[in-house]
Image (spheres, rainbow, N blue to C red):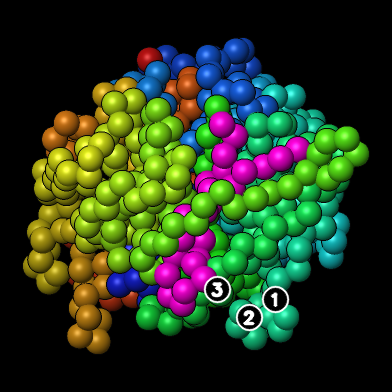
């Protein structure tokens, strides 16, 4: 994801949380469903891939699905109905789960010391194993919430936390752990916060190593088998971004134990592009091996796209990471780079809503287009059409030369979701996650609700959360595919066997929770403000 899905949601960030629980339900009517559940086998067998990188051949093994960050699953057509389970209630999740060769999924949380934060679940959401409960340097700590685990061809799992890089076998045995570079001193985050410096998801290199860029711009390359460094650490030259202050953090956000209080300010700053140098998942060109990183520029308040070339160790000499090019962008550290289908272009967005296309060989700017993109990573289909999360609005599409094709139209599904309210007026819809492309459709997470006036400003209050199917040709919403149980604020993962996974970030729901009693009093019977619960929604197709 980039992970700046939330950057465009500042207007809703206000206030304290209560936690709710959810059971398995049928999602077409929010009641148990009948029919044949497509459980498949627990393993996926071999999935066709075109990668020379050592990812597991499972079809979703990194935060944005594939090494090019395209969020594309063309072999899956959305089912007519799904059965839903919810796991890990009481813990926010922010990055997508990834898929192991045995069919299990890996997902991270951000719970305080004494809790596990790397979880391996089966296809029904039951826990298979977890990392040890975090205690000091033992166990994966709460900052793992910022990273998706990545999975290699042997089923090994790789994940970072605040200060360490971990690798586990698919059965939960620790393979190695590597200390990450330290965050700046003194701690740049708020008093009482931890000085965290994780990767926003690692990547594999063409020579089989594992690479990550820390939030403070250090590029680390480690041996996949041993965890030993394969090259000196490269410090990207960009400046530290300024603290984000435009949108104050609500005192109630991620409260009541849904996230470790000591990482709340760092996570908030990372999500909104404050203080750090890079808050993105790198993209990797599978043919050339070039790594693309969006980060800050050497000029104050500017971002840059970096092309990095990785040279493996040879003849007893260490390898290296070299900057092939650096091309300036607008404000912020940008969104996670995304490669075009032919890998000739790389796309990213800045904090002013500009969508950029750069040449992957030279870094030359090919075109840019105003998009209202919420500094969130785009998706790309097999024909090269680009889909962005937008603010205001939900999504937009662009062709391969930067011409806008459409702005999403969710008017019909919004009217069907909620009635016009006597106090708050017509219902609203807000994009609540990055789009994912499937066969014949674009899927995107949204919430429906109302704009409620608070101290003279409209606050978007969520009442329902859903996955919506858009027509890729027109942007018109066809239907609600399934309801989610909390606000999502992340990425929608789609597995090759048709399973969907929706992270429940709870950022919006916890922020507005103190307004719920006032708003609920004005809603029709049977409706209420979404209650925070966190966790992960899993959707199993019903055949």
Q: Which residue is mark 2?
A: 188
Picture residue at 45% right of the left edge, 45% below the top: 362
- Specify whether 147 is left or right of 366: right
Residue 81 quadrant: top left
Q: Disc number at residue 508?
A: none
**Total number of numbered discs in the rendering:** 3
Picture residue at 43% right of the left edge, 32% below the top: 343
Picture residue at 78% right of the left edge, 54% below the top: 232
Q: Is residue 518 above or below residue 361?
A: below
User: Element under label 2?
Assistant: loop
| Residue 430 x, y percent position in the rendering | 26, 56
Q: Do the residues bearing badges 2 and 1 touch, measured as CB atoms within 8 Å?
A: yes
Q: Which residues are magenta?
A: 288-312
Q: Which residue is mark 1?
A: 184
Q: Who comes first in sequence, dot 1 or dot 3?
A: 1
Residue 410 or 335: which is nearer the viewer?
A: 335
Other residues around mark 2 within 10 Å, as few (<14) / some (14–19) / many (≥20): some
Does the magenta-highlighted stretch encompass residue 297? Answer: yes
Q: Is residue 521 above or below residue 440?
A: below
Q: Is residue 468 above or below residue 152?
A: below
User: Element under label 3?
Assistant: loop
Q: Which residue is mark 3?
A: 239
Mark 1 or 3, closer to the camera? 3
Question: CA gap, disc 1 to disc 3?
Answer: 12 Å
Secondary structure that dominates the magenta span:
strand
Q: Who comes first in sequence, dot 3 or dot 2?
A: 2
Picture residue at 42% right of the left edge, 62% below the top: 328
């Amino acid at each position: 994801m980039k992970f700046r899905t939330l950057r465009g949601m500042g207007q809703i960030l206000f206030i304290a949380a209560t936690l709710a629980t959810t059971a398995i339900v049928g999602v077409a009517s929010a009641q148990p469903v009948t029919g044949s559940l497509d459980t498949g086998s627990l393993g996926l067998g071999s999935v066709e891939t075109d990668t020379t990188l050592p990812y597991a051949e499972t079809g979703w093994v990194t935060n944005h699905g594939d090494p090019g960050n395209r969020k594309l699953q063309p072999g899956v057509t959305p089912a007519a109905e799904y059965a839903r389970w919810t796991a890990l209630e009481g813990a926010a999740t922010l990055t997508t789960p990834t898929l192991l060769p045995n069919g299990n999924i890996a997902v991270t949380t951000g719970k305080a010391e004494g809790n596990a934060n790397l979880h391996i679940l089966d296809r029904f959401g039951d826990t298979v194993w977890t990392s040890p409960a975090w205690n000091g340097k033992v166990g994966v700590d709460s900052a793992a919430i910022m990273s998706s685990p990545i999975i290699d061809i042997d089923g090994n799992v790789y994940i970072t936390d605040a200060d360490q890089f971990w690798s586990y076998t698919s059965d939960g045995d620790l393979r190695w752990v590597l200390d990450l570079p330290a965050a700046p001193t003194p701690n740049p985050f708020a008093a009482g916060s931890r000085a965290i410096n994780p990767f926003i998801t690692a990547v594999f290199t063409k020579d089989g190593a594992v690479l990550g860029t820390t939030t403070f711009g250090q590029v680390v390359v480690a041996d996949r088998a041993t965890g030993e460094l394969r090259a000196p650490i490269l410090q990207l030259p960009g400046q530290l971004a300024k603290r984000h202050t435009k949108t104050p953090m609500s005192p109630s956000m991620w409260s009541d134990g849904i996230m470790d209080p000591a990482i709340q300010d760092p996570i908030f700053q990372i999500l909104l592009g404050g203080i750090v140098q890079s808050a993105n998942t790198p993209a990797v060109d599978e043919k050339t091996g070039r790594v693309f990183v969006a980060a800050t520029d050497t000029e104050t308040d500017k971002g840059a796209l970096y092309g990095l070339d990785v040279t493996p160790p040879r003849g007893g000499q260490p390898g290296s990471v070299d900057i092939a090019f650096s091309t300036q962008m607008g404000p912020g550290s940008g969104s996670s780079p995304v490669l075009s289908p032919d890998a000739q272009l790389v796309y990213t967005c800045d904090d002013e809503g500009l969508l950029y296309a750069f040449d992957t060989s030279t870094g030359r700017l090919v075109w840019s287009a105003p998009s209202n993109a919420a500094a969130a990573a785009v998706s790309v289909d097999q024909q090269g059409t680009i889909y962005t999360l937008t603010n205001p609005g939900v999504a937009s599409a662009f062709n391969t030369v930067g011409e806008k094709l459409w702005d999403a139209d969710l008017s019909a599904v919004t009217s069907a979701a909620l009635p016009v309210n006597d106090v708050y007026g017509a219902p609203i819809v807000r994009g609540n996650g990055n789009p994912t492309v499937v066969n014949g459709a674009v899927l995107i997470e949204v919430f429906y609700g109302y704009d409620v006036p608070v101290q003279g400003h409209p606050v978007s209050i969520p009442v329902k959360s859903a996955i919506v199917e858009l027509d890729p040709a027109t942007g018109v919403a066809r239907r609600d595919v399934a309801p989610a149980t909390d606000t999502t604020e992340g990425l929608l993962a789609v597995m090759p066997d048709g399973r969907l996974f929706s992270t429940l970030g709870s950022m919006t729901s916890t922020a507005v929770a103190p307004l719920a009693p006032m708003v609920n009093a004005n809603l029709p019977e049977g409706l209420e403000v979404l209650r925070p619960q966190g966790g992960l929604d899993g959707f199993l197709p019903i055949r």
